[in-house]
Image: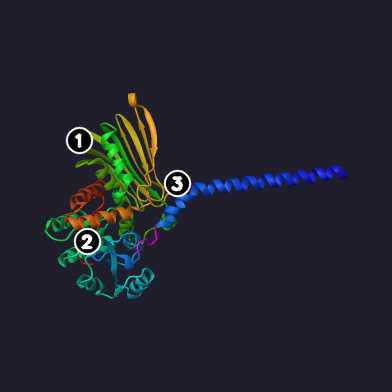
Amino acid sequence: VARHAHYTCDKRTAMKGVRTTVLVGALAVLTTCLAPFLRRCWRLPQVLVAPADKAPDALRVGLMGASFIGQVAAVYAAGKRRDVVVTAVASRDAARAEAFARRHGIPVALGGPGAYDDLLKRSDVDAVYISLPTTLHVRWAAAALAANKHVLLEKPAAANLQEALELSQLAARPGPVLMEAAHYRHHPAALRSRSLMQERLGPLQRLEARFFMLDPKAWLASGSPDPSGSEHERVKNFDRWWYCADELLWMSGATSWSVRSAVEGRFSIEAELLLTLPSWPLAQVNATISMSRDKLWPLFDWSFHAEGSEGRLAYSNVGFPFLFHSLSVEMFGSQAQRWDERLYGEGETTFEHQLAAFVSSVREGQSAATAEQAVRTMRLVDDILKAAGSQPLLSGASA
């Protein structure tokens, strides 16, 4: 009995040691796998260039709106460059502006009803980053250009085609630069996807742009009536499916299209298109757009897919590829092969690449992302809404 008890005790000890070893090994593997991702996450808010180390001729940027996207796209991105410094932030909520400035070490906070006008009058502001609601973009972009300030305008640049045409006219005038902040276009993974699609896949046959990301509030409200009307939710939807429309045109270079069908839901939109590409003018490419905020599955799918006669590709996490992404390519026929690519560089964010392009545009006096792309995208957006039996999004010019 004693020997049996001793054997049982040794067995339990051995099993405990095995479990501990397996657990430690699993944690080590998990940590190793997650380490690059965690380093990229850690980079996002890091300040790599202190204010005292900024170049004397650094581009001085004022923020119109004390928003989260302004924090990520302007403050965090500028914190990694010597040639950009954020000098002021403006918000109609004075307390919000002051808290934002204090948190990020911005020397000037402007608040109250005249905050945006006050920002445009400042001599220590060369350019403004406008992250106001989409329906206010045209009004304040026009005011900033009139004040001789360069403008980085958060996407979508306009709420409808008419507004996009107004922006195009403003951008065509000599003077300050106007650039739409379509940050996803500037990442190496997006540029590589575009190059592969246009140069390696042969005549394109099918394109698909997806954006599924669960919005808990939308999911909870999806089964209830909407007594307040849907325009607010339509604008929130548009902020997402704009990416899908813009991706199709920017990736493919399509300049004309027809909308075969479209359905606009309270928290979603679906559309089927036929695109005509300058490179293959006699062929039409089937394309689809899918966006939903209230679907439980997939929880997250922000991807672009392309298939041609010679191959296909899939590019995942279009919006935030600096955190994680995959670019998978499969070639057909005699060139049959498959490969995956990852293009992280040093972990630079899409917003860092975008700010670099904006600075270059300002220094060179020309826009890196012209207003014509915004016009094409908004023309497609309005065509999709028309096919769905919906009105264009309301203009906020008088807001």
Write down the quadrant of residue 208 in the picture: top left
Label 3 and label 2: CA atoms lie apart by 38 Å
Say above or below: 361 vs 122.
above
* Residue 107 horizontal/vertical position (percent): 31, 73
Q: Nearer the viewer, residue 64 or 158?
A: 64
**Residue 304 — which label?**
none
Q: Circle 2 — which element?
A: strand
Q: Earlier in the sequence, mark 3 or mark 2?
A: 2
| Disc 1 from disc 2: Cα separation | 32 Å
Q: Mark 3: few, some, or many residues within 10 Å (few <14, many ≥20)? A: few
**180 or 43: which is nearer to us?**
43
Task: State the SS at label 1.
Answer: loop
Image check: 56 left or right of 147?
right
Q: Which quadrant is home to the N terminus?
A: top right
The residue singled out by tag 1 in the image is 279
Tell me the chief SS of the magenta region. loop
Q: Nearer the observer, disc 1 or disc 2?
A: 2
Amino acid type at image mark 1: Ser
Question: Image check: 126 left or right of 315?
Answer: left
Q: Is residue 278 left or right of residue 342?
A: left
The residue tagged 3 is: 297
Q: Which of the two discs, 3 and 1, labels the residue nearer the N terminus?
A: 1
Place of residue 27 in the rendered image (x, y in percent of width and height, measured from the top left): 57, 49
- Image quarter of residue 128: bottom left
Q: Which residues are magenta?
A: 44-49
Label 1 Cα neighbours within 10 Å, binned few <14 / some 14-19 / many ≥20: few
> Which residue position holds label 2?
151
Residue 64 can be seen, yes or no: no
Name which residue type carries label 2: Val
Check the image and report above or below for 21 versus 336. Answer: below
Pointer 1 or 2: first along the chain: 2
What percent of the width, then of the height, locates residue 279?
20, 35
